[in-house]
Image: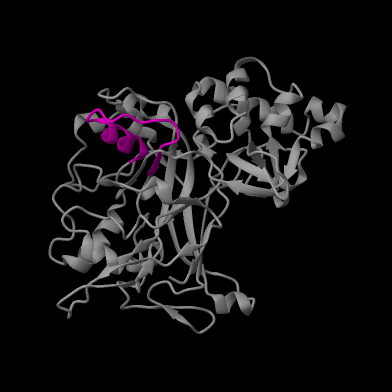
Amino acid sequence: MNRTHDPGLASWVRSAQGSDFPIQNLPFGVFRRRDTNDPASVGIAIGDQIVDIGRCAAAGAFRGLSADAVTACSQPSLNSLLAVSGDSRSALRSQVSEFLAADSPSYRNDPDKASQLLVPMADAEMLLPAEIGDYSDFYASIHHATNVGRMFRPDNPLLPNYKWIPIGYHGRASSIVVSGTPVRRPRGQIKGVDKERPEYTASRSLDYEAEVGCIIAGSNRLGMPIAMESAEEHLFGLVLVNDWSARDIQSWEYQPLGPFLAKSFATTISPWVVTLEALEPYRVPANQRPSGDPEPLPYLDSRMNRERGGIDVVVEVYLSSRAMRQAGIAPLRVSRSRLADLYWTLAQMVTHQTSNGCNLRPGDLFASGTISGPGAEARGCLLERTWRGAEPLRLPSGESRSFLEDGDEVTLRAYCNRAGAVRIGFGDCRGVIEAA
């Protein structure tokens, strides 16, 4: 905790107060000015504005320990920034906080010049924040795993390894897209229960998955695991992730090797990376395991993880049909769940991923898997929310949904809020389904 977390801190950017991006947040992203030939730039969100780090550097705004981080921000992605030291990144965030503070000498001495270092979000096109070389998706919510298991294995919903090992699979990095990118309904092999042969056709059971992802900073050499005590040094910040899933394709292909074409057609992430430093006030102990559950094996355990390995992020999912938007009907909130309910923490995911010597690189993406909690309204996908289609959702327009239809828009939102701290948000992670 440091001065950047002070709940009494205010900004001269008026739109910051009460927004997802107050001065206590300061997430990083990559943007391009609309209708220009300007290259992509690294920016920091404040209210409805973006601090252009390149312009700030040219104006001599940031010096000292942050110099390496400022130089890294001259690239059109966050990858170079993710490769510099955490101290340098933290120093840059601290200097940006000082520059944006209501009592900032830079603003007080020359308000017009300071304001010229900002770009309105309305004038910016947001891009993927990093060049993502590798993408691992986990299955860290025991509520999600149990619900899905009950559908297919009522007598034995959780497989024997679940409480011992953070389950994950290697996703497809090439089809990760930024929020707002349309998602085309995939085609694939589908085999009906009463059919002798599969057919190649458009998915009829398209689903969303409400997840939180982590952008990796730094690296480890091939063959060198990352211990729990240093795992969080490799967690730069969090984004929202919608790992779109074609459930009918998935049910035919997933045995024996797991998800493949049912998930690789698109994964949407939010454009702003909320740093782990900004999330410090919202740290909580790792989720308490029920009595009788095994304790983590020693390589997945640490005092720090037990005491503060969780992060209390509330994740919400909103659904809007084409008919709802045409009628001006507000999106329906279909779920609300908490990252803190995960059975496995982000640090445990990093340590387990590297425990066999797997090397991480700056810009890699880890995702939590569907985040669900106890109760129907905390189920983070339609497969659970409609119980495999048996309990369809009723929309305000009079429509019903078992799975997504063409024209449906899914929006993920998330925030952190607690007494003694300022509420911070993540922005939107949004996608509209297009026909196959």
| Residue displayed at 73% across by 50% down | 35
- Left or right: 20 as drawn, with respect to 17: left
Q: Is residue 355 magenta?
A: yes
Q: Is residue 87 above or below residue 418?
A: above
Query: Which quadrant is home to the N terminus?
Result: top right
> Residue 103, percent across and down?
78, 30
Q: Quadrant of the C terminus?
A: bottom left
Q: Which residues are magenta?
A: 345-366
Which quadrant of the structure image shows residue 159? bottom left
Residue 48 drawn above or below residue 5: below
Asked if residue 364 lies in the magenta stretch, the reply is: yes
The answer to whether 26 appears left or right of 55 in the picture is: left
The residue closer to the viewer here, 211 or 133, is 133
**Which residue is farthest bottom?**
398
Q: Quadrant of residue 224?
A: top left
Q: Residue 321: give x, y in percent of width and height.
A: 52, 74
- Measured along the vertical axis of the image, is residue 315 above or below residue 94? below
